[in-house]
Image (cartoon, grey):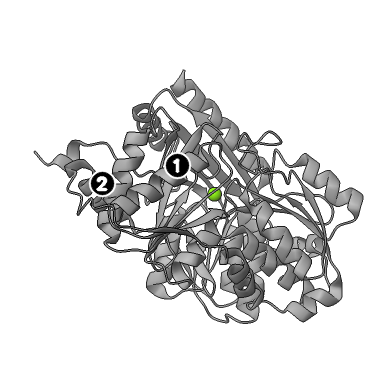
Amino acid sequence: MQASNVKPRLFGTNGVRGVYGQDLTHDLVIDISYALGTYFGKGAIVVGYDGRKSHLVLSRLVRSTLNSAGLDTANAGLIPTPCLQYAAKRLGYNGGIMITASHNPPEYNGIKPTAADGVEIPREDELKVEDIYYSKRFDRIDGTGQDYNDHNIVGRYIEAVLALIDVERIKQRKFTVVMDTGNGAQAVVAPIIAKKLDCKVIVINGEIDGDFPSRGSEPTPDNLEILSEAVRSAGADFGVAYDGDGDRSIFCDNTGAIYMGDKTGALLVKHLLSQKHKGSEVVCPINTSMILSAVAEQAGSKIIYTKVGSVEVSREMVKRSCPLGLEENGGFMYGPLNEVRDGAMATALMLDMIAASDMSLSHQIAHLPQSFQYKTKFSCPSREAVDKIIKICIEHGSPQKIETLDGAKIWIDDETWLMLRPSGTEPLIRMYAESTDKSLLDSKVDEYRRYVRSQIS
Ligand code: MG
């Protein structure tokens, strides 16, 4: 019997996450840290955290465990995940660990390892770490590692972002930007970048608070009404909202309309393919909007599809040296900085794009190919139920074709699809749908929504 076949996976879609004190116990965190120490082999390892209430305890626990395993650590303090990843890549560390549960509810926290190349460790390496964790074959426990503070990360990161955009052209425009940092970690970086670009910056929900009292930690088109109103009343050029650890960004145009990440991401891709990155491939998960493929096709570029999950996209970008990648949930990735999702970099590129054009954001979006999208999630009693219901849905109706790269992407016709897939972190089914025909989309979404619900109850 293979031990790795019977032990539960620790890593979900993005790191090891759980309810602090229940699933994510101190014992688990210590042993995961030892396993990561053995995996990294040597330090220094940079450790950062977002604003969740358990961050200080967990950061101390992770760092002192690594120190006891003989690895030096740097305390990066409270920073967005992409800043930590940048530090791991460029500031001389042999890896990084971010204490975050990203957009999960407040009671969650997590351990997210980053390799020395600045990107989340590959999926196959997650299995190596799990094997070390379960075998308890830790290299050494000698207590010889040192811990120190690194206060230079945010400054160095901001310089690197500014070096990749046309600073002077943006400054001339004196943009007004509303930033909803959602009580999360991007409050310590994104507004500073916009101010350095001579923008008038209006920050809402700017206080760090691990309970995420304003709108929760996940920005979605449904919970950003305050952002939308603030953009309209300030006459701002655009608005942007970030998730708890600041890697995801959801944009709002100058009229207050809020968009899913693949629509604004397609616009950024169009801008970058027309300028610095002519002919580049674009990497994205299979649930991405057809708008992106239309934009890439118009620019003579090719789309590379992956399974859903930012790690899959990031690692594919690294493999292909591809500068452009994105996720529909607002995870835009710009390889010249780092092949990871980055809310502040995406915002800087949005400013760069608007400055390069005489059209407002709403006009630029209106010039994109049109499609209608829908997204929802269904809570299920268990992970087993999730898999069973998706399997039943594959047999429902008579679709044109079904792709099973990840979950089930059900093509109704050439321009209409629905996709059902299990969440990597919770017992949920995520449903995505898109069509160029609004009424067909509505009727198919309604049909599948009722069908899934009937299977759950
Ligand atoms: Mg996140």
Q: Is residue 28 left or right of residue 372?
A: left
Q: CA distance from mark 2 to mark 1?
A: 19 Å
Please indicate, yes or no, whether residue 367 appears anywhere in the rendered image. Answer: no
Question: Can you say whether 58 is above or below 112 in the image?
Answer: above
The type of residue carrying mark 2 is Glu
Q: Between tags 2 and 1, which lies in front?
A: 1
Dot label at residue 377? none
Q: How many marks?
A: 2
Residue at mark 1: 58
In this view, the residue in front, 128 or 275, is 128
Percent of width and height locating residue 133 = 24, 44
Question: Can you say whether 393 is above or below 265 in the image?
Answer: above
Q: Is residue 162 left or right of residue 203?
A: left
Percent of width and height locating residue 327 = 54, 56
Percent of width and height locating residue 44 = 38, 64
Residue located at (36% from left, 40% from top): 29
Instruction: Mark 2: give few (<14), some (14-19) or many (20+) Cα within 10 Å.
Output: many
The type of residue carrying mark 1 is Leu
Dot label at residue 130? 2
Residue 157: quarter of image: bottom right
Residue 159: quarter of image: bottom right
